[in-house]
Image (cartoon, grey):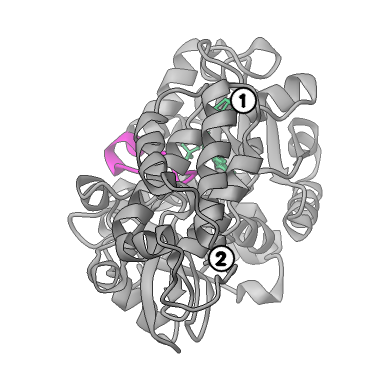
Amino acid sequence: MRSPVGLLDGPPPAAGAEGLASHEARLGRLPVGSEAQGLIPMLEASGLQGRGGAGFPVGRKWRSVAERSGGRAVVLANGAEGELLSMKDRTLMAARPHLVLDGALLAAEAVGAERIALYVGQEHTAASASLRRAITERGGEVMRRAGVVVAPSGYVSGEATAAVRYLNKGVALPTSTPPRPFEQGVGGRPTLVQNVESLALSALVARFGDAWYREAGRRPAAGPALVTVSGPVARPGVHEIALGTTVSELVAAAGGLQAHVQAALIGGYFGAWLPSEQALALSLDPAALRARGVAFGCGVVAFLPAAVCGVAATADIISYMAAASARQCGPCLFGLRAIAEATGRLAGGTPAPEDLVRISRWSAQLPGRGGCRHPDGAAGLMRSALEVFAEEFSLHQRGACQHGAPQRKAA
Ligand SMILES: Cc1cc2nc3c(=O)[nH]c(=O)nc-3n(C[C@H](O)[C@H](O)[C@H](O)COP(=O)(O)O)c2cc1C
Ligand code: SF4
């Protein structure tokens, strides 16, 4: 299931941060100078796509920043990881800080950036401590250029424009665009906002080449990936896979299911519910998933036990997403709140007569109407819930639930 070189190869992540000596002994020194300059075409040839959620091609993004940089760009390594079901970024930063740092340094060299900001979620204290130690271990030049910036908690803090705004103004809320960060970001400079896993993978591509990356996936998918598995599996948590691995193979690697499951949430809170049989047969190949209308997102696979009500689990997620709105755009603030309230009434056994019909209409109307993609993600998740838990939703609309008393346990 794994390629011979991976993000989490080496000492077990539970052992804590890998030091510089072990990192270099395992992977060799970082390519510098002209070798690093050739990295943009290599990344383009590799097909590496971003791992923060949207799956944008990494090489193309580096090129866009490099073209505008004039040597004054900024690299913003995104380790905010506000997604509640994901743990892969904090695990990677805590266990392999030098690999993340390698990626950020290579990016800075390739795009022409002076400053590197490692933007790490407030709760991920082991990750920020580990990155700080790694910066100190590198010493001199790296200590001058790179620093950890603690991102405030909250789902939207990790959105690219929110991260840039936080560095500029101390407010981690999305801004309306254009200009996009790659045009005008931190301090008005072209800014490369790149997820930390994407950067770590770039550092492996720099060492082992674009062919290595393509072969590390299961054709037609390319590359390794970190995924976070939750629900009733023997070993929940972060696993490294070759993209293209099926969900049932991932479950086997996680020690198998320990209880009956009815559905799985693929891609996290911006993702989609699927019935368990369909989910288990899925290949975790971002392109194949996209063709089915499912996003790989940040690599979340969360199973819902058969004993837990799908309406209640969805109500919890939507209520969290509504509360996480940055409250700057009417459709996001009022639309998500209305959907969350109606889903909460259905889940709690006190539905208003038209709740189900309204939720369905509102979640179809919401996408594209906010300043950022936050409401689109939540509405997509809601639409998938209405499909997968259709029977349960209509029972709840009639004031019943096949799970008995409403249960308030999220996936
Ligand atoms: C509401 C919202 C929250 C986001 N949170 C994160 C996050 O915590 N970490 C992250 O890397 N990207 C997050 N993103 C995606 C970023 O906007 C951006 O696309 C990403 O950091 C770019 O890196 P990548 O191309 O390597 O994926 C979020 C996007 C949205 C709309
Ligand atoms: S859509 Fe929502 S989260 Fe995004 S900017 Fe508007 S209010 Fe903020």
Where's the N terminus, which quadrant? bottom left
The residue lying toward the viewer, choosing from 26 and 364, is: 364
Q: Quadrant of residue 3?
A: bottom left
In the rendered structure, the answer to whether residue 141 lies left or right of residue 100 reads right
The 10 Å Cα crowd at callout 1, few under 14, some 14 to 19, many 20 or more, is many
Q: With respect to residue 171, does 199 lie above or below?
A: below
The 10 Å Cα crowd at callout 2, few under 14, some 14 to 19, many 20 or more, is some
The residue lying toward the viewer, choosing from 17 and 327, is: 327
Q: Circle 1 sits on which residue?
A: 174
Residue 109 visible? The answer is: no
The residue lying toward the viewer, choosing from 128 and 268, is: 268
Determine the secondary structure under disc 2: loop
Q: Residue at x 31, y 72 (%)?
A: 276
Observer-side mark, 2 or 1, equals 2
Q: Residue at x 59, y 30 (%)?
A: 333
How much space separates mark 2 and mark 1, taking CA atoms?
27 Å
Q: Which residues are magenta?
A: 42-55
Q: Quadrant of residue 119?
A: top right
Q: With respect to residue 198, does 65 lie above or below?
A: above
Q: Is mark 1 within 8 Å of ligand 2?
A: yes
Was residue 108 drawn as part of the magenta stretch in this picture? no
Residue 20 visible? The answer is: yes
Q: Residue at x 55, y 58 (%)?
A: 350
On the image, the x and y values in percent for residue 322 come to 59, 41
Determine the secondary structure under disc 1: loop
Kind of residue sitting beneath label 2: Ala
Kind of residue sitting beneath label 1: Pro
Was residue 47 drawn as part of the magenta stretch in this picture? yes
On the image, the x and y values in percent for residue 371 come to 52, 21
In the rendered structure, the answer to whether residue 287 lies left or right of residue 254 reads left
Q: Circle 2 sits on which residue?
A: 410
